[in-house]
Image (cartoon, grey):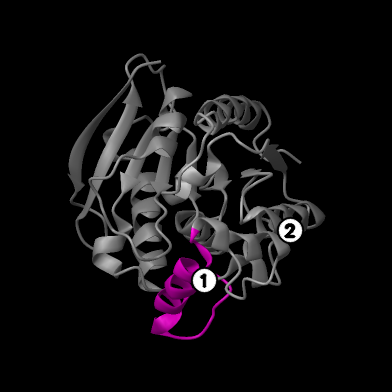
């Protein structure tokens, strides 16, 4: 499916106008699902004009993807980053922003640092807007500020561990480590929306991603978890280099399409 995009301003978001890039397939169907997409960047980047291969992959599955610039208003600091993101989510839940219709399913998605914020939005949606969120898509989410896993120790090979250390320090500089800020430390995760979770065998965030998926399952949350083979181009998510083609994009699109169909038939995936 060919994907097109356009820039627009979400003027009626409660927290203030938020710029967004909207991705959509040229031939998406009636009542298309809407995805609030939150970009990565180690809580340090805020390039709203950057290419978003993850957003493109989700749009290829038939969704309308709202790439919201949560960074500019928030400075990538908690809790402001979550407040901006949740405000956009609330706007989409109430109005569908004129993008879909009242039957459109609503998802939140993010990779790396954006995966953290997406998981936080899912937790907050459970607490404040039950049943408004149909699913969450977490792609190599950056969840653990302690960075003590075996896989993350290997991140030095692609120059990411120091960057993530700086990013976590920046993100948490606004106050204490609330469970919404570090979802892997949250003691109450039952009742959140079904999750589609991606990592790869050579992903530095492999261990914390797998660990969060296991905890969600143990809490009774419907989870679809996929571990892609090494060499699928996964480090490109972090701006790194890979000898392999970015095959992960095709995998993300295909598995998200399956997730959409499952959620539409069996909303809670339990």
Q: Position of residue 240 (x, y in %)?
A: 45, 48
Give the quarter of the image for residue 251.
Answer: top right
Principal secondary structure, stretch drawn in magenta? helix
Residue 232 located left or right of residue 34: right
Q: Which residue is mark 2?
A: 211
Q: Which residue is mark 1?
A: 181
Give the quarter of the image for residue 208.
Answer: bottom right
Residue 151 against residue 168 in the figure, above or below = above
Q: Secondary structure at mark 2?
A: helix
Q: Residue at x 41, y 49 (%)?
A: 239
Q: Nearer the viewer, residue 248 or 85?
A: 248
Q: Residue at x 41, y 83 (%)?
A: 173
Q: Nearer the viewer, residue 145 or 98?
A: 145
Q: Residue at x 65, y 46 (%)?
A: 202
Spatial CA distance of label 2 from label 1 is 17 Å
Residue 197 against residue 171 in the figure, above or below = above
Is 179 inside the magenta-drawn segment? yes
Is residue 179 shown to the viewer in this render? yes
Q: Report the quarter where the N terminus lies.
A: top left
Q: Secondary structure at mark 1?
A: loop
Q: Position of residue 200 (x, y in %)?
A: 65, 43
Q: Position of residue 2 (x, y in %)?
A: 35, 17
| Residue range of the region highlighted in magenta in the rendering | 159-181
Residue 205 located left or right of residue 41: right
Is residue 103 shown to the viewer in this render? no
Mark 2 neighbour class, 10 Å CA radius: few under 14, some 14 to 19, many 20 or more = few
């Amino acid at each position: 499916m060919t994907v097109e995009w356009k820039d627009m301003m979400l003027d009626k978001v409660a927290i203030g106008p938020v710029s967004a890039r909207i991705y959509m397939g040229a031939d998406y169907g009636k009542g298309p699902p809407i995805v609030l997409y939150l970009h990565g960047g180690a809580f340090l980047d805020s390039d709203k004009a950057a290419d978003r291969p993850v957003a493109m992959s989700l749009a290829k599955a038939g969704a309308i993807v709202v790439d919201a610039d949560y960074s500019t208003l928030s400075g990538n600091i908690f809790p402001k980053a979550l407040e901006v993101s949740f405000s956009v989510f609330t706007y989409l839940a109430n109005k569908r922003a004129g993008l879909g219709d009242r039957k459109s399913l609503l998802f939140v998605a993010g990779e790396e640092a954006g995966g953290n914020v997406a998981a936080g939005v899912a937790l907050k949606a459970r607490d404040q807007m039950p049943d408004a969120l149909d699913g969450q898509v977490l792609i190599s989410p950056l969840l653990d500020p302690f960075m003590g896993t075996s896989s993350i120790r290997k991140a030095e090979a692609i120059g990411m561990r120091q960057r993530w250390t700086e990013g976590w320090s920046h993100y948490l500089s606004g106050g204490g480590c609330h469970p919404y800020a570090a979802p892997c430390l949250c003691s109450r995760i039952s009742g959140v929306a079904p999750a589609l979770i991606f990592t790869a065998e050579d992903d530095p965030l492999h261990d914390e991603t797998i660990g969060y998926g296991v905890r969600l399952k143990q809490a009774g949350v419907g989870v679809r978890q996929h571990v892609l083979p090494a060499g699928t181009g996964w480090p490109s998510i972090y701006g790194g280099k890979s000898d392999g083609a970015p095959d992960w994009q095709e995998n993300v699109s295909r598995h998200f399409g399956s997730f959409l169909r499952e959620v539409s038939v069996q909303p809670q995936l339990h």
